[in-house]
Amino acid sequence: MLNRVADVGSVHEITLGLIWTLCRGERACGLAMTPASAPRTLPWPGTLAGRPLAELASWLPAWNPHEASIGLAAVNAALNTPDNPLLANSTPLAGGGNLAVFEHFAPQLKGRRVVVIGRYPGLDAYAGALDLTVLERQQTEGDLPDPACEYLLPQADWVFLTASSLANKTFPRLAELSRRATTVLMGPGTPWLADFADFGIDYLAGVDVTDSAQLRRTVAEGGGTRLFEGGVRYRLAALHAAT
């Protein structure tokens, strides 16, 4: 992924929001989920704007969670540009807001074993109609912990995998365990990169930015799912048709 980020200009701004981290580059904005907690002594605040975008993208492999999150946002700012052919040829998903991806696939999920990596607000609306299991690090009632992936993913028919797994380093193992399933890599932090097909990913469900100013305000003011109320919208690409 990082070898696709070369001379792509400098960082205009980093916004480390409560829920989302936003990187604004010269040609696009990129998102990644902000880690749940932060120390009071991060070493780089006030120094990131103006740095090469490729430099911050190189933070993605870092074990510091905030640096990895900024790295993913920078990767997305570099890759998710208007001339990205995968993004340009993807299909916009109408309605549903942050649940638009599940709404789109719902008819195909009935009677299938579905595992979702990451708790999406409002997902319980599908619990009665689908055989649905959620794996989540910050568990709420009904969620299963991370280690359950070793047992559930090999038996799943469909897996919805959060793009946050790219920053927290769980993606390679989760993708490996999901090889038998139809797998969707999804979320606002998804890079529009066809190479994910090499990991067995069947679909990318990422976003495009519809209003960068509104997106920045929403991120800065602690927005989570409100990103979808004017800042971004979900789009879908089938990788087996794109490679």
Image (cartoon, grey):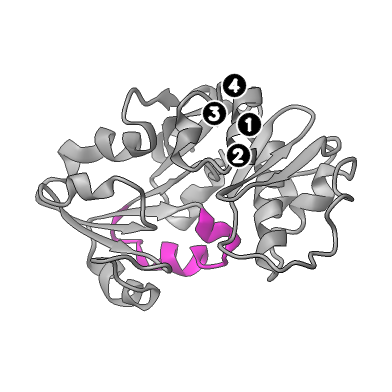
The residue wearing badge 4 is 211
**Image location (x, y in percent) of residue 181:** 28, 57
**Amino acid beneath label 3:** Asp
Q: How far apart are marks 1 and 3 (CA)?
A: 16 Å
Query: Which mark is in front, 1 or 4?
Result: 1
Residue at image coords 60%, 39%: 221
Identify which residue, 70 or 80, lies in the foreground.
70
Residue at image coords 42%, 69%: 137
**Image location (x, y in percent) of residue 43:** 84, 64
Query: Which mark is in front, 1 or 3?
Result: 1
Circle 4 Cα neighbour tier, 10 Å, few/some/many (<14 / 14–19 / ≥20): few
Q: Distance between the residues labelled 4 and 3?
A: 9 Å
Instruction: Identify the image quadrant of residue 69.
Output: bottom right
Q: Distance between the residues labelled 2 and 4?
A: 16 Å
The residue wearing badge 1 is 217
**Amino acid beneath label 2:** Glu
**Amino acid beneath label 1:** Arg
Q: Which of marks 1 and 4 is nearer the N terminus?
A: 4
**Image location (x, y in percent) of residue 176:** 42, 66
Q: How far apart are marks 2 and 1 (CA)?
A: 6 Å
Circle 3 Cα neighbour tier, 10 Å, few/some/many (<14 / 14–19 / ≥20): many
Q: Does the magenta stretch include residue 175?
A: yes
Q: Can you tell which mark lies on residue 76?
A: none
